[in-house]
Image: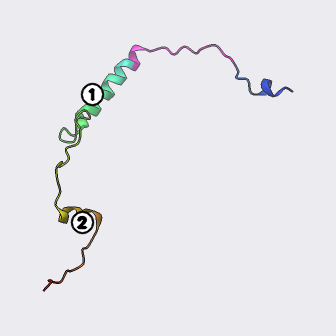
Amino acid sequence: MNLSARNKMLRRPPTNVELKLDDILEYNTMKKEQESSKDPSDSKSFNTPPTWNAGPKSKSEVYKRVGYIPPATSPIY
């Protein structure tokens, strides 16, 4: 048996899937049920970018974020 013959894909005619009126009605009712059960306060727009506090940060904010604890400094005389 030839190697290229084993790896060849089988051809078959395309399958027809009929869309019936009952299927469309069932889809519409399920869609309405999902929309009515969805919490309106939970819906967020995916088109808006997240709001980040842009701008310069203080050293203490940066240290807190990265987990750095600066050593205690003694006063210089």
Question: What is the quadrant of the C terminus in the image?
Answer: bottom left
Most foreground residue, 42 or 25: 42
Identify which amino acid the numbered label 2 is placed on.
Tyr
Residue 56 vs 72, above or below: the answer is: above
Lateral position of residue 67 relative to residue 40, left or right? right
Residue 10 vs 47, above or below: the answer is: above
The structure residue drawn at horizontal position 17% and vertical position 49%, both measured from the top left corner, is 53
Q: Position of residue 29 (x, y in %)?
A: 31, 25
For numbered disc 1, what is the local secondary structure?
A: helix
Dot placed on the residue nearer the N-terminal end, 2 or 1: 1
Q: Please, which residue is most extreme toward the bottom here?
A: 77
The disc placed on residue 63 is: 2
Crowding at dot 2, Cα within 10 Å, few <14 / some 14-19 / many 20+, comes out as few
Q: Please, which residue is most extreme toward the right here?
A: 1
Most foreground residue, 48 or 27: 48
Crowding at dot 1, Cα within 10 Å, few <14 / some 14-19 / many 20+, comes out as few
Magenta segment range?
A: 11-23
Magenta-colored segment: predominant secondary structure:
loop
The disc placed on residue 32 is: 1
**For discs 2 and 1, the disc positioned in front in the rendered view:** 2
Q: Position of residue 65 (x, y in %)?
A: 25, 62
What is the quadrant of residue 27 in the picture? Answer: top left
What is the quadrant of residue 25 in the picture? Answer: top left
For numbered disc 2, what is the local secondary structure?
A: helix
